[in-house]
Every structure is written in structure tokens, then in C-alpha cells.
């Protein structure tokens, strides 16, 4: 900040009888353009509730170097001429409820001074790779636009952004924001169309303290505890969540205390407050639909092992233990074993409490040990039959 600007800020604090750093109110005056007779000592300019469509280069350039705050809320802004705030030291700029379809280029004229920026309730559909580069923003509000895509590098060099508001947009996936790693503290994503939240995208948010995902399309969530601090407050009501064993991790976020319902499934929980659903209840609740329910903590290795054991037993039955008259009907007998035990693999393997086999596949052990135990248990049970 140049010495001259610092001097005037100190003068504002002294007030000097109100002659310096004025608050100018031009709200609701029927204006269609920025007037040219604004006091050169203006510190705050309220020009909301008018019909201004364009901010011209001559409106502000090198005219109001004490200007710290502007409010253009509820105008008809659709265009900013390039370099239109040159020579200003704006700290806050509000362009809420206008008709902008893209983010205006502000980075070369206010990139050092601007802390608070609002473009909420416009028609912005995409954030380009250069839209917010090298800004000194603390808080950015883009709520209630039509943003469906955020280009990589959009926040490159923006090193202080603590709060990012993206509510009421058209995002379908959790945004990846690697430029804000170790910087962003609060992220608001309510009322989008987000149906997945990849851990890779979440892994960049190492300083996050608040995450709001309310009213999206999420049915399942990955285990955030692997990438986020346990001190994060998470809100997610209004999603069609399947509250089952793979959601048990959420109970570790004690700051996310819900006195409302967040579970759509199972149906017996959709009227139960989240605070009344314990971690044990979740761990014992299978995920998936009725035809293929499963409990958590298993892998495809267990599935392959299960089928290997069944196929081994079918092979032995067909080739070693069938009576001669049964070998003629070995297809039927094979189908019997396949239908009975392979179906058990498909429908119960990730329940993975094979009660008949006394094998707890949801607690992984070394592959060879599991296989040998399974072979022994299976052989004993099949021979007993």
C-alpha cells in the first residue's frame, strides 16, 4: 500500500469533521450510469437498487483513491470495461443481483487490496482458469449462479481465501481446488447437483473447518477421516443418503451434531435424528439393495476367494465323489452347488459373515491363510452334508 493511501486512511480515522472519506448514498435514484459528480473524498459508495448496465473505464479510474467499498447490488450490470477500477484501493465490492454472465477482469487493478467480493445472484456459468488469479481475497461469494464448471488453476496465486460460497449452482461433482490447499477454511456447496465427493478433491482441503453439502444428490460418501481433520463441521441434510456401514466414519465428527434427519435409507431411519443413530447401528447396517446387501471392510479378493472355494468343491464333487448314476446328471448337480453356494457368494459375501462356514471375511487376513481356512471349513461342511 503506497504511503499516500496510508496517510488518507489514517486521516479517515481522525474524521476531520467529516470532510474526508465520505459515505455517499446513491441507492434507489433511478440511475442508468455512474454519475461523474461523486465526491472525490468518497470512502464508501452505495449505489444499489438502480438500473446501471455498464461500468465504464472513466467511471472510477484514478478518481477516487480513498474509495474502499462499493455496493452495486440490484442493478442491471452485464459489462465491465477493462481496467475500470484502476487507481482505486477497493477492499470490498458487491455486485449481487445483476446480469453478469462471466467474472469481470479485476485482478490487475485491485488484486492487492480487494478482500471481500460478491458476485452472488448473477448468471455466471463457468469459472475460467484466470478469473481469480493472484487476488488477495479473504471471502468470495458466488452463490446463486449457474456455475457448472471450475477450470483448473482458477485460484492460482490466491493465497488468503478463507471462505468460498458456491451454494445454489449447477455443480455435479465436488470441486477440486488444489490452489487452495492449506488455505481454504470454509466451503459452502449447498443446493447443487453433486452426486459424488472424490477423496482426491477433498485431500486438498487440509485447513478446512466447515463443509456444507446440504441439499445435493449424495447417496454415499467416502471416508473423509482419511483426508480431513476430525475438527471439521460437516452439514449434509437434504441428501438421499444411504445410512449404512460405510457411513459409520461420520460419527467421528462430533462437531457435526444433527438434530434432524439425514438418512433416506433404510426407511426405518428416515424419520430418526442423526444424533440418535449410533456408530454401532451403522456398522451393523448392510449397504446395497435387498438383492446384493453387503457389510463393509471387504475387498474383491474375498469375493474371488469365495467363488474359488465353491468352484473347487464343485469340481471335486463332479469328478471324485459322485456315484456312477449321478455322473450322468452331473450338470444338474453342478447347478445345484453353483446355485446354492455361488449365490451365497453373490448375495452374502460382503455381509461376509458366512455363518455356515464360520468365516469372518470382513476382517481381512493374509490371503493364503484365509484361503486355507475357507478350504478346510468348506470341505468339512460339504463332507458333513
Image (spheres, rainbow, N blue to C red):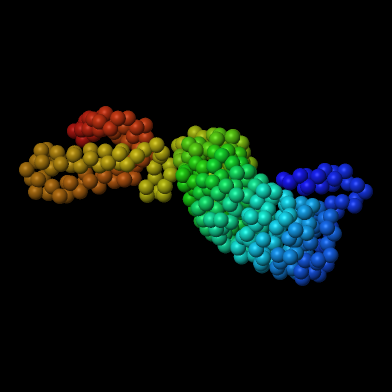
In the image, farthest residue toward the left: 324
The residue sitting at 26% across, 29% down in the picture is 369
Q: Is residue 49 above or below residue 312?
A: below
Taking depth in this image into account, of 221 and 305 the one nearest to the observer is: 221
Taking depth in this image into account, of 119 and 91 the one nearest to the observer is: 91
The residue sitting at 70% across, 49% down in the picture is 113
Q: Position of residue 114 (x, y in %)?
A: 69, 50
The residue sitting at 60% across, 63% down in the picture is 102
Q: Is residue 197 above or below residue 320?
A: below
Taking depth in this image into account, of 154 and 264 the one nearest to the observer is: 154
**Is residue 25 rendered to the left or right of residue 78?**
right
**Is residue 39 rendered to the left or right of residue 344?**
right
Regarding residue 235, the answer to whether it shows in the image is no
The residue sitting at 82% across, 55% down in the picture is 42
Count all numbered tags in the image, as a single digit.
0
Regarding residue 47, the answer to whether it shows in the image is yes
Q: Is residue 116 above or below residue 97?
A: above
Q: Position of residue 366 (x, y in %)?
A: 30, 30
Taking depth in this image into account, of 260 and 144 the one nearest to the observer is: 144
In the image, farthest residue toward the front: 3
- Residue 259 sits in which quadrant? top right
**Is residue 352 rendered to the left or right of residue 329?**
right
Q: Position of residue 328 (x, y in %)?
A: 9, 48
Quarter of the image that includes the N terminus: top right
Quarter of the image that includes the C terminus: top left
Q: Position of residue 234 (x, y in %)?
A: 58, 42
Amino acid at each position: 500500500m503506497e504511503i499516500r493511501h496510508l496517510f488518507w486512511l489514517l486521516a479517515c480515522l481522525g474524521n476531520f469533521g467529516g470532510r474526508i472519506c465520505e459515505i455517499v448514498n446513491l441507492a434507489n435514484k433511478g440511475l442508468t450510469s455512474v454519475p461523474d459528480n461523486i465526491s472525490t473524498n468518497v470512502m464508501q459508495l452505495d449505489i444499489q437498487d438502480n438500473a446501471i448496465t455498464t461500468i465504464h473505464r472513466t467511471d472510477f479510474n484514478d478518481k477516487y483513491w480513498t474509495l474502499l467499498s462499493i455496493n452495486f447490488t440490484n442493478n442491471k450490470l452485464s459489462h465491465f470495461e477493462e481496467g475500470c477500477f484502476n487507481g482505486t484501493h477497493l477492499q470490498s465490492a458487491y455486485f449481487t443481483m445483476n446480469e453478469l454472465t462471466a467474472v469481470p477482469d479485476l485482478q490487475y487493478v485491485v488484486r492487492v487490496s480487494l478482500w471481500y467480493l460478491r458476485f452472488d445472484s448473477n448468471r455466471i456459468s463457468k469459472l475460467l482458469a484466470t478469473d481469480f488469479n493472484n487476488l488477495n481475497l479473504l471471502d468470495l461469494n458466488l452463490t446463486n449462479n449457474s456455475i457448472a464448471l471450475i477450470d483448473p488453476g482458477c485460484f492460482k496465486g490466491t493465497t488468503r481465501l478463507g471462505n468460498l460460497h458456491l451454494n445454489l449452482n449447477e455443480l455435479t461433482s465436488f470441486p477440486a481446488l488444489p490452489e487452495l490447499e492449506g488455505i481454504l477454511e470454509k466451503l459452502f456447496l449447498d443446493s447443487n447437483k453433486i452426486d459424488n465427493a472424490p477423496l482426491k478433491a477433498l485431500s486438498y482441503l487440509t485447513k478446512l473447518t466447515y463443509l456444507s453439502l446440504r441439499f445435493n444428490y449424495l447417496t454415499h460418501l467416502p471416508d473423509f477421516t482419511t483426508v480431513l481433520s476430525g475438527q471439521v463441521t460437516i452439514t449434509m441434510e437434504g441428501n438421499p443418503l444411504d445410512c449404512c456401514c460405510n457411513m459409520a466414519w461420520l460419527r467421528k465428527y462430533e462437531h457435526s451434531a444433527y438434530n434432524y434427519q439425514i438418512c433416506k435409507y433404510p426407511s426405518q431411519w428416515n424419520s430418526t435424528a442423526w444424533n440418535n443413530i449410533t456408530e454401532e447401528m451403522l456398522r451393523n447396517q448392510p449397504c446395497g439393495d435387498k438383492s446384493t446387501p453387503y457389510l463393509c471392510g471387504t475387498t474383491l479378493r474375498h469375493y474371488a476367494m469365495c467363488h474359488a472355494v465353491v468352484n473347487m468343491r464343485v469340481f471335486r464333487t463332479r469328478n471324485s465323489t459322485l456315484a456312477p448314476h449321478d455322473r450322468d446328471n452331473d450338470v444338474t448337480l453342478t447347478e445345484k452347488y453353483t446355485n446354492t453356494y455361488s449365490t451365497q457368494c453373490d448375495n452374502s459375501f460382503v455381509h461376509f459373515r458366512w455363518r455356515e462356514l464360520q468365516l469372518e471375511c470382513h476382517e481381512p487376513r493374509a490371503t493364503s491363510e484365509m484361503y486355507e481356512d475357507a478350504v478346510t471349513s468348506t470341505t468339512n461342511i460339504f463332507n458333513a452334508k
